[in-house]
Amino acid sequence: MNGLVEIIALVVFLFLFVVGGYYLYLTFSGPRKIEEIDRLVRQGRFRDAMFQLRKVIEKDDRNLRARFLMARCLHKTDDAGAAVLELRQCLKIAKYTPEVTEAAVRRELAQCLEEVNNLTEAKNEYLILTQIDAGNYDNWYHVGDMFFRASLHSKAVPYLKKAIALNARHADSLAILGQCEYHLAAYQEARAALAQAVQLKPDHTVGRYFLGLALRYLGDHDWALKEFEKAEKDDGLKEKAILARGMTLIDMEAYPRALMELDRGLKIARAGTDTFLNMNYLAGIAAERSRDLGSAIKYWEMIEKLKPGFRDVRDKLKQYQEFRTDDAIKDLMIASSAQFETIARSMLEGMGMHISSLRLVGDAAVEALASESETNKRMMRKAYTLILIQREMNALAERHVREFHESMREKNASRGIIMTTGEVTPQALSFASSRPIEIYDSTRLADALKGVSVN
């Protein structure tokens, strides 16, 4: 009997010894093993670490640290989708420690969600981080960046400003804030943020490009040109930067320089792209304003061939139809200012006008005061006609005819004639029909120009 008791006591003792030893092993050996795996992760030995982590998770699937390290390994080995699943398990376990905090889990999750292009949920994670880790500027920056990428510029601004308040030297926050302000047409604010961004990060080419755009709208063209030139160093921005330089030079009325710049861009831009089409369009504008109408038409015809109906190209080609088919209109349109004045004088004299005065109005119009004949010399007072000859393609509107009618009164002209190479609106014709005003459209003007020499 005593022997049986001793055997039972020995079995119980051995059982307790084994169980206690097992728990001691888990207590002292388990954490040490996780530390070793953590060391593998920090050394970049992700595959080795994942092999060990699977064993740990098989034994304890609620081991927060093991799952977090597994998620990090998956993330580092470009399997962000699988990492998301592990991190969601971490949030369910939620037994956070100094080694694995909630902020660390949510930050890793936000990064992985962003990589799998789930921007809505990524933004939500960063929004939570702005509450539980409010002092970290990076959380505020990412929320602002995601609102910006969704074109929600006004929503992005306060988050970016908070990021800058926490870290005034974060160039990316400043650059994106500047872009948001630019899209919101707050050009002064955009310039301030972008100028600071490129000062902190001189190679921030996107920042330089948008700084140039803001400066262009503010009229600081010289500075804008310099920023676009620096932005060109980025191959991804090169074409856009050249296009922007062309626009800026047109704003400066430096049309020959604009043409050179845009032609340079056309050599590298891919045919048919929006950038290529806009370069051709603006080159046409620059050529038109330089009175090189033949070149302008060639640029616009290229656009019409590649993308019919692009912007107002079809209207421009229609406006210049007379130029393309009638040499007299062509000569008038491309004539220098002095030649334009000579053509106008010769045409009016050919119409039997006796010119009292004739003057250029800018580069696109001639105004003359004339009497049509001297057959009635016994009249004590001559009847004068005011003539306006326009060589521009903007449509003649009612307000233009009203202004001309007022000018007739001021000059005591009893009759008026408006000649234009552009279209004439029905409203302008209606207003003129009830006044002593005659309108010559491009066809009638071309008839009047027949036989008139440029020289």
Image (tube, helix red, strand yellow):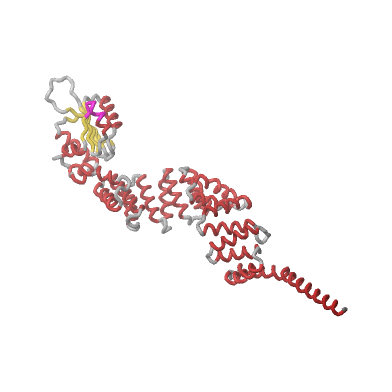
Quick one: 443 or 308, which is closer to the camera? 308
**Which percent across, then down, holds residue 118?**
51, 56
Q: Quadrant of the C terminus?
A: top left
Q: Quadrant of the N terminus?
A: bottom right
Vertical placement of residue 70 versus 269, above or below: below
Q: Is residue 38 visible?
A: no
State the extent of the magenta-drawn residues as a range.
Answer: 430-437
**Which percent across, then down, holds residue 72?**
59, 64
Write down the quadrant of residue 26 in the picture.
bottom right
Q: Is residue 332 visible?
A: yes
View extreme (left): residue: 375
Vertical placement of residue 87 versus 428, above or below: below
Quick one: 328 or 51, which is closer to the camera? 51
Question: Residue at left 45%, top 43%?
Answer: 185
Write down the quadrant of residue 377 in the picture.
top left
Vertical placement of residue 292 versus 113, above or below: above
How many marks the image carries: the answer is: 0
Question: Residue at left 62%, top 69%?
Answer: 53
Q: Is residue 325 left or right of residue 22?
A: left
